[in-house]
Image (tube, rainbow, N blue to C red):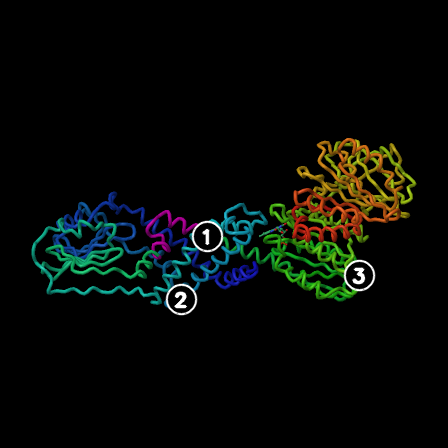
Amino acid sequence: MTISVWRYSHLVLAVSSFLLLTLASITGIILTFEPVTQKLQPYRVDNFHQLTLAQTLPGLKKSYSEISELSVDANQFVQIKGSDADGKNLTVYVDPQTGKSLGVPTKQNEFFEWVTALHRSLFLHEAGRFFIGLTAFLLLLITVSGTMLVVQRQRGLKRFFTRIVRDNFAQYYHVVLGRLSLIPIFVIALSGTYLSLARFDLIGTKKVSSTIDFDAIRSKPERKLADFDVFKNTRLADVQSIEFPFSEDPEEFYTLKLNDRELTVNQITGDILNETKYPTAVLLTNLSLDLHTGRGSVIWAIILAIASGNILFFIYSGFVITWKRLANRVKNKYTANESRFIILVGSENGSTYRFAQIIHQQLLKQGEKSFLTELNNYALSPNAEYLIVLTATYGLGDAPTNAQKLAALVEKYPQKQPVRYSVLGFGSHAYPDFCKFAFEVNQLLSRQAWAVPFVDIHTVNDKALDEFGLWAEAWSQQANIPITISSDLLKSPTRRLDTLTVVNNTRTSEPDGTFLLQLQPKSRQSVTSGDLLAIYPGNDHRERLYSIGIVDQAIQLSVRLHPGGLGSSFLHALTPGETTQARLVKNEHFHFPAKAPVVVMIANGTGIAPFLGMISQNKQQTPCHLYCGFRQSASFGLYQAFLTESQSAQKLTNLHVAYSREGEKQYVSDLLAKDADFIANTLLMKGVLMICGSLAMQKDVLELLESICQTKLGQSVSVYQSHSLVLMDCY
Ligand SMILES: Cc1cc2nc3c(=O)[nH]c(=O)nc-3n(C[C@H](O)[C@H](O)[C@H](O)COP(=O)(O)O)c2cc1C
């Protein structure tokens, strides 16, 4: 069963019962004070549980001239009805050992009486009782569906009580308190339902009345009450009530209503004249009353009050959660057919929509036609040029509910024109399959003939605004459409620029125009290979990002000069000793893995930059294999000496180079295909593959990795991506 079935049932049940549930909870909380206040009355004797009828009845009979009935209530207060020496009727609480009067019972407090009537029947008699019974039943179903949701959220029954990942206040405490009060709420709901069924005689609670053989009643041997076996063996704690005989006639008898049976006892001989066990339904009704009202135990009454308070919180937090989800419903200005930008969202709890809205609104503000919808609404979009997918991951690395149909729809509706796609995954490292569904979507799109990779897949951990900002910058740079994430959304609104001094610039005239630039930040920076350097060549919003490697304690960039290119021309012109302003951006997901047994680096062109730094910093000599591709051997010349030296220093284990325009005319993916077994083994032993370079190379490599993973490991590459064993930083 999917998560949505439980979620929708939970919601529908909650919506249909919340008014009565609120009323029942409030009145329920008030009513739990009744047993607590009653228990505080001084009518209970200390050794109540040890007393037998043989120890108590003779004394009581002596103390009162006539007793018609003795009863023991849920508070274990003993009450007798009878008359005193003057023949005056009395009803008193007594000490069952001494017969001493302890007090006169008072009528139920009027306020409690009023609240009880409201709680039980809404002052509507039978109709009200029916609705209250129905509410108890709905609460039972809500508890069951809620339990299933927690099981799914926690990924199995075994992990039911393990740590809960904090999403937002309402959601977090809805689950935390739900788990804690699950049992008391279940008991409240089940006992309430049972009591209602019993009230409407839908459960056989009729007691079978006893028949007595009057001819068999003996009047000898006469015994004292204290010697009656049945009285010796019956504890006061097991008694509900005792009816005393009217007169001394042997045909008049004691009727003992115990907790589980009814006995009639000969008043002269102590013989048991009849014994009737109560049906199970009656016992269950009594148990339900104890459990539902907390009448027997102060501690249980307090637990019930807390659980009822929690029900009120669930009603509130449930509405907040639903409100947030509904608030994300989108009203589009343009249709999907006419829009140039299609933004598709996969979200379970709605937060991803907030991010999608930022992009959507920015595009609209700039006069672009943008259409925002959920992934399940994927369709043909004849004017689409850009497709942006923002999606969360749920369950065991699964699709959110509103994205489950995507794969089928993409197969069914291939776009007719090329569309540039970019996927942004939202997830949390608290789950083992980090952003798995986003990687799957990326994989799915990469297989479509019409889909052109535009910006490398990015991920956002725990809704981190800076990670979202990083993707937005990359996308905006690539599309040349300024997307500014407003200062109130990004926590670090003002860009803090660092001053960097140019240490070296090779400014080579390599055939493909590649050069190496080394920069030294003025202030000490915690920067490492794989991080990014953002430059602002035009001193305006236009930002260019470069992957950096740390070589000889300086920041090293590998840049290809594009004729007329804004960023590359700016960097190419920098001369040693000159200073420039730039921003260092942490790029945690592409750092050299601290614990991997082996690292395979895959690059083409200037994508080698971060790897040069990682190799240079590989002092612990983690086995490193570099697969890189260039157009011709001259392009590789820039790095050759460094890499040979690193091999001798055992910072680099193996080097594989492909040239696309010389010799065998190979691509980096051809080198990998030859070493398919090695690649599969690397993943198997939890080694890490890192890919940096062009998106076209990334697409080829991912296709190859998918087939290697499928054939040799029986898994999709997205599984390894989601476990951070395949890391990518492509552009
Ligand atoms: C029950 C549950 C399961 C989740 N499973 C995963 C998961 O397998 N992988 C992951 O990266 N994130 C997982 N997440 C985290 C969400 O994907 C992340 O919080 C996301 O930002 C939520 O987006 P939304 O509010 O739009 O649904 C899970 C969250 C919840 C509540």
Tell me the number on the disc at residue 299.
none
- As for residue 227 lying within the magenta part, the answer is no
In-image side of 473 versus 168 (left or right) = right
Q: Name the amino acid, label 2.
A: Phe
* Percent coordinates x, y for residue 105 in the rendering: 25, 53
Instruction: Quarter of the image for the N terminus: give it.
Output: bottom right
Q: How far apart are marks 3 and 2 (CA)?
A: 62 Å
Magenta residue span: 288-308
- Which sits in the foreground, 537 or 34? 537
Q: Which of marks 1 and 3 is nearer the N terminus?
A: 1
- Which sits in the foreground, 288 or 489? 288
**Residue denoted by label 1:** 182
In-image side of 137 versus 229 (left or right) = right
- As for residue 293 lying within the magenta part, the answer is yes
* Percent coordinates x, y for residue 529 in the rendering: 75, 38
Q: Can residue 108 be seen by looking at this rendering?
A: yes
